């Protein structure tokens, strides 16, 4: 009976959780939208608007120095807030394509996503790349078409592009009235009402609801715009799908909202729909069996590690997604990789740089676990039987560089610093079997900039990079241990070990990679490796 009650409590708590990520191309307005969602949730009282001054203008979800300097998100922030009877866990992902691996890992920890599209630019390269990651996980996606208060593309053209390039059915939930300086608001499809933008509004009170057939509407909106609205809505009803919750949750249809994050317009409709339609925590893929949210025993996995969030303290926080059970502060959970219990005395709920102790947490919640390096990405924490969470890979790097340290006496410090940053997922680290230099592997150039600036700022290690003669890396395995040993002995000059001591082949060019696969057909060369 007690277990039934516990399952009921867990199911009820999970039903009121919404854990989602925001994905977009850089500069589509993702950080601004994040700020405004937090404003609606009461988590902040002043959005970090661009026209504010000094520290006030630096968006609160962008905390690393390089993010604030360049105005982009390069690490994942986690923020918790309440709205509409639900607890939201919002993960703000890096928008820059050089950090797609961090974004991929973040998407393993969420149940749905909001895709932000710039109304003037439509689908951009990075949006497409991130969307493909969502597609791999059949993730439900809502779309927010942002910046309607600037000159934009035709809404039908934007919807066609989403449908064609992302192979998704589209269902607009509202329809814009004008654009740029002539943008007046939106018409809701479901109610038929018009939401007008209040020109001088502050805070979250930015919309005024007016019935479509109200006499006052013609005094406030150009009659030609209203005529165009009626014609376009007629086309929408005839040509586009009504919202279908089952199709949305299966990842086949995206509801589309038009608005302006900067003007705090259209945010409420998006949030209300997240409450109403977005999935609560789903079963998590794991071995030997998927983890159900209503299982009484606590389990969770580390999807991100962040070191030095507070420069004054050399702290290290593992971000853990709770997948089942009711977590309570002070619990001991087994870390499956080492088979050792970890007492979690000071778990954290996040709001960017603000933190609060988490006394308890439910499936879908994200907690921070301070630690001294025991936890890394992919680790499972379990109260009961061992589980291994799957689908959290490392990807083969696209850029490989040698690390040159100015002071050779600090080689030990460099080893520790690189291992720390590798566990965060900032870089991958390879130790060649021959030669003393470390080799770092990244997906994009900006990761190298972040690596260099953090080594200098946080570890006081000025370094330089020089090109390594390799184009990519592949993890090597073989069913026959003797065959793997023969390969390793033959190709020692091109082999390195990753931080777990796994053999990695460093390929000089695509011909080299093809040749080695022909020469050693019993050895498998992998582009990805599970981090569990």
Image (spheres, rainbow, N blue to C red):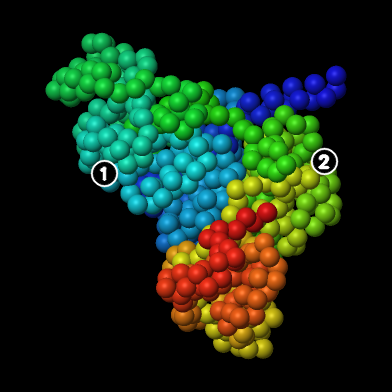
Q: Is residue 290 above or below residue 339?
A: above
Mark nearer the N terminus (2 vs 1): 1
- Using the image as rendered, state which of residue 284 and residue 458 is in the foreground: 284
Please identify, in this view, whether the residue under mark 2 or under mark 1 is nearer the observer. 2
| Mark number displayed over residue 384 | 2
Q: Is residue 517 above or below residue 90?
A: below
Numbered disc 2: secondary structure? loop
Q: Residue at x 68, y 65 (%)?
A: 480
- Using the image as rendered, state which of residue 56 and residue 128 is in the foreground: 128
Apparent side of residue 227 relative to residue 404 in the rendered image (left or right): left
Quadrant placement of the C terminus: bottom right
Q: Residue at x 30, y 23 (%)?
A: 240
Observer able to see residue 286: yes
Q: Name the residue beneath numbered marker 1.
A: 120
Observer able to see residue 36: no
From the top left corner, tell me how far across and down residue 414 is, in percent. Answer: 64, 78
Numbered disc 1: secondary structure? loop
The CA distance from mark 2 to mark 1 is 51 Å
Rate crowding at label 2 as few (under 14), some (14 to 19) or many (20 or more) other CA atoms within 10 Å: few
From the top left corner, tell me how far across and down residue 189 is, in percent. Answer: 34, 19
Say which quarter of the image contains residue 9. top right
From the top left corner, tell me how far across and down residue 224 is, in percent. Answer: 14, 23
Rate crowding at label 1 as few (under 14), some (14 to 19) or many (20 or more) other CA atoms within 10 Å: some
Quadrant placement of the N terminus: top right
Apparent side of residue 206 relative to residue 496 in the rendered image (left or right): left
Q: Residue at x 78, y 51 (%)?
A: 336
| Mark number displayed over residue 217 | none
From the top left corner, tell me how far across and down residue 12 is, in percent. Answer: 69, 23
């Amino acid at each position: 009976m007690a277990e039934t009650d516990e399952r009921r409590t867990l199911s009820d708590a999970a039903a009121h959780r919404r854990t989602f990520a925001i994905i977009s191309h850089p500069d589509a307005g993702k950080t601004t939208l994040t700020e405004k969602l937090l404003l609606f949730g009461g988590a902040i009282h002043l959005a970090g608007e661009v026209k504010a001054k000094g520290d006030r203008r630096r968006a609160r979800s962008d905390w690393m120095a390089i993010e604030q300097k360049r105005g982009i998100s390069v690490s994942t922030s986690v923020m918790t807030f309440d709205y509409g009877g639900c607890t939201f866990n919002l993960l703000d992902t890096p928008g820059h394509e050089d950090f797609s691996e961090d974004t991929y890992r973040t998407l393993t920890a969420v149940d749905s996503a909001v895709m932000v599209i710039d109304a003037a630019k439509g689908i951009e390269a990075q949006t497409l790349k991130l969307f493909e990651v969502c597609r791999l996980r059949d993730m439900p996606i809502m779309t927010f078409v942002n910046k309607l208060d600037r000159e934009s593309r035709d809404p039908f053209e934007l919807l066609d592009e989403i449908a064609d390039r992302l192979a998704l059915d589209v269902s607009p939930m509202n329809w814009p009235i004008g654009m740029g300086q002539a943008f007046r608001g939106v018409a809701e499809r479901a109610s038929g009402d018009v939401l007008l933008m209040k020109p001088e509004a502050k805070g979250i009170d930015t919309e005024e609801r007016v019935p479509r057939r109200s006499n006052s509407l013609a005094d406030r909106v150009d009659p030609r715009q209203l005529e165009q609205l009626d014609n376009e809505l007629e086309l929408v009803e005839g040509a586009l799908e009504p919202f279908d919750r089952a199709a949305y949750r299966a990842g086949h249809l995206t509801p589309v909202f038009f608005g302006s994050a900067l003007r705090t317009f259209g945010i409420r409709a998006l949030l209300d729909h997240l409450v109403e339609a977005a999935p609560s925590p789903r079963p998590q893929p794991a071995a030997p069996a998927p983890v159900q949210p209503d299982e009484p025993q606590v389990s969770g996995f580390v999807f991100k590690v962040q070191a030095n969030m507070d420069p004054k303290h050399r702290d290290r926080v593992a971000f853990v997604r709770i997948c089942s059970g009711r977590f309570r502060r002070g619990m001991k959970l087994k870390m499956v990789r080492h088979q050792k219990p970890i007492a979690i005395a000071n778990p954290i709920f996040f709001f960017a740089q603000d933190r609060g102790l988490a006394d308890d947490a439910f499936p879908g919640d994200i907690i921070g676990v301070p630690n001294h390096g025991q936890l890394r990405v992919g680790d499972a924490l379990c109260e009961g039987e061992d589980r291994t969470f799957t689908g959290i890979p490392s990807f083969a790097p696209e850029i490989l560089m040698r690390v040159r340290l100015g002071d050779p006496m600090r080689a030990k410090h460099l080893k520790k610093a690189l291992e720390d940053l590798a566990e965060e997922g900032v870089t991958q680290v390879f130790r060649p079997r021959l030669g003393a230099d470390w080799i770092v592997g990244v997906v994009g150039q900006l990761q190298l900039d972040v690596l260099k600036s953090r080594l200098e700022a946080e570890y006081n290690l000025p370094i330089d990079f020089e090109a390594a003669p390799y184009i990519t890396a592949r993890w090597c395995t073989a069913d026959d241990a003797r065959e793997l040993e023969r390969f390793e002995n033959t190709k020692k000059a091109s082999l390195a070990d990753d931080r777990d001591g796994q053999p990695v082949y460093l390929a000089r060019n695509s011909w080299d990679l093809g040749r080695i696969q022909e020469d050693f057909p019993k050895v498998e060369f992998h582009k990805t490796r599970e981090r569990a």
